[in-house]
Amino acid sequence: MEQNQGQGQVIVITSGKGGVGKTTTAANVSTSLASMGYKVVVLDLDIGLKKLDLILGLENRVIYDIVQVIEGECTLKQALVKDKRFPHLYMLPAAQTRNKDEITPEQVIELCDQLKPEFDFIFVDSPAGIEQGFKNAIAAAQRALVITNPEVSAVRDADRIIGMLESANLNDIQLVVNRIRPDMVKADNMLSVEDLVEHLCIELIGVVPEDSNVIISTNKGEPIILNEHSSAAKAFHNIAQRIAGQQVEITNFEEDTSFWHRIRNIFGGR
Amino acid sequence: MLDLLKKLYNRESSSSRTQANNRLRLVLTHDRIGASNELMETLKEEIMEVIKKHVDVEGTPEVTLISQGRQSALDINIPLKGR
């Protein structure tokens, strides 16, 4: 394991469109990195619409929030919520009754500067949209993960976001394709991973298949990483490994090994 | 019977995936440079005015947006009249 000597990497998780899986990705990739032994903190910057605490199953442990830290009502250390299941994982919750324009990009940079010496990875969970909340979320980031779904509106918004990241001189951008359905791609009824990479022209870091285990885990407040039968869990773990610099092949979930597919292959059909 | 097999196995060009790709290609190219269809028409008309001042044009000129990666370019195709 390569420990970052006192300078954690700040990674923003963003998408433009809402509901594509930003928070799920933030929660699971950070959990996975923490289980690998890295010190990880996740910041919820979706102020006013917080959800990271709920996805991580830490909602009952929240005392202070990020706005209170910034306004000096509590210390950063007091506000950080430690995940008892993963000793290296911490979360900084968003405020639920405040607005996104109550904090500034400069304050986020200052906050991340305080966290960098303590952590290997600092994930910033961005709100949907391209307004102030997005600008706050990308302010301190050195790297961006853009999450999209194989769906036209999500791809269009992702493209807009990539343009905005590049304008902000954030050029280390990688793509996560979430909720792909290999059966639908096979039937030519869904955009494929290759299609998405071709449209968005950025490097791919992971492909997460549609997996009902994600809903089940979220219901329970358990990270899906703990479910070893889940294909999504495997995909999130692979993303974490790549973020940590390991060379892991991206699993191609489009490889159909179903009975009918094999039969069709035997008869030379496609 | 043959038609049925064709339907089953032929990946037709009008599949919803192909349509999604074509629609995306168009909107993304326009989104990236902030161009609308009207702007393309205006561009075409004004470019033609300038060209016509100096040379004779024949046939239908074409002004289209092409993109490679995240870069876009205007592709202007104006057939000229020979002497």
Image (spheres, coloured by chain):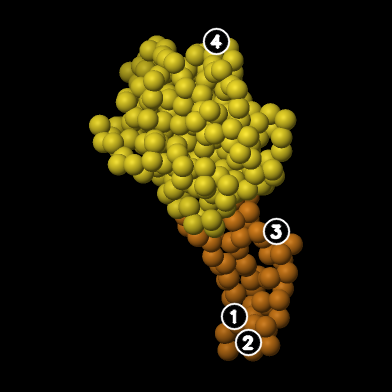
Chain colours: A yellow, B orange
In the foreground, A10 or A103: A103
Give the residue number, with chain letter if any, for mark 2: B55
Q: Earlier in the sequence, mark 3 or mark 1?
A: 3
Measure the alpha-carbon separation of dots 2 and 1: 7 Å
Measure the alpha-carbon separation of dots 2 and 3: 28 Å
Measure the alpha-carbon separation of dots 3 and 1: 27 Å
Residue A154 at x, y = what percent?
60, 38
* Three-letter amino acid code of the residue under disc 1: Leu
SS for dot 1: loop
* Three-letter amino acid code of the residue under disc 3: Ser
- The nearer-to-camera label among 2 and 4 is 4
Chain to which mark 4 belongs: A
Give the residue number, with chain letter if any, for mark 3: B36
Q: Earlier in the sequence, mark 2 or mark 1?
A: 2
Q: Is residue B82 visible?
A: yes
* Three-letter amino acid code of the residue under disc 2: Val
SS for dot 3: loop
Chain to which mark 2 belongs: B
Q: Are marks 3 and 1 on the same chain?
A: yes
Give the residue number, with chain letter if any, for mark 4: A220
In the image, which disc is placed on residue B80? Answer: 1
Residue A100 at x, y = what percent?
68, 40
In the picture provided, is A111 more to the left or to the right than A6?
right
Q: Is residue A146 visible?
A: no
Q: Earlier in the sequence, mark 2 or mark 3?
A: 3
The answer to whether marks 2 and 3 mark residues whose Cβ atoms lie closer than 8 Å is no
Q: Alpha-carbon neighbours of circle 4 within 10 Å: few (<14), some, or many (≥20)?
A: few
At 57% across and 71% down in the image, what residue appears?
A: B77
SS for dot 2: loop
